[in-house]
Image (cartoon, helix red, strand yellow):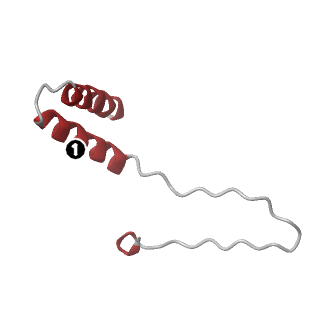
């Protein structure tokens, strides 16, 4: 499904930029947003910890994200 959406985004935005029809931009933007919503990756953080350092991990409910 992801490759189909990626292809649709690429083709629709390409057609919109060539002036085919303004609706292609809307199709491309909608497919891009759907693709982004489906592929929500977790937040990743990397750091070197030294002796005595601490790390705190917490989860925020979906409705409370800023």
Q: Which percent across, then down, holds residue 19?
A: 16, 27
Q: Is residue 50 above or below residue 37?
A: below
Judge by depth and name the residue closer to the eye, 31 or 13. Answer: 13
Judge by depth and name the residue closer to the eye, 6 or 59. Answer: 6
Q: Which residue is mark 1?
A: 30
Image point (35%, 29%), residue name: 3
From the viewer's perspective, tell me whether residue 40 is left or right of residue 42. Answer: left
Q: Residues within 10 Å of mark 1 (few under 14, many from 20)?
A: some
From the viewer's perspective, tell me whether residue 58 is left or right of residue 29. Answer: right
Image point (33%, 32%), residue name: 6
Q: Which percent across, then down, holds residue 37?
A: 33, 51
Q: Which percent across, then down, holds residue 36?
A: 35, 47
Image point (69%, 56%), residue name: 46
From the viewer's perspective, tell me whether residue 52 is left or right of residue 26. Answer: right
Q: Which percent across, then down, holds residue 61?
A: 42, 73
Judge by depth and name the residue closer to the eye, 30 or 51. Answer: 30
Q: Is residue 63 above or below residue 46?
A: below
> Looking at the rendering, in which quadrant would you find the N terminus?
top left
From the viewer's perspective, tell me whether residue 44 is left or right of residue 40. Answer: right
Q: Is residue 61 above or below residue 45?
A: below
Image point (41%, 71%), residue name: 65
Q: Is residue 62 above or below residue 34?
A: below
């Amino acid at each position: 499904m992801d490759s189909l959406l990626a292809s649709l985004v690429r083709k629709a935005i390409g057609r919109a930029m060539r002036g085919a029809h303004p609706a292609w931009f809307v199709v491309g933007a909608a497919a891009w947003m759907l693709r982004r919503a489906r592929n929500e990756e977790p937040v990743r953080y990397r750091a070197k910890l030294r002796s005595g350092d601490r790390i705190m991990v917490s989860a925020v409910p979906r409705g409370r994200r800023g």
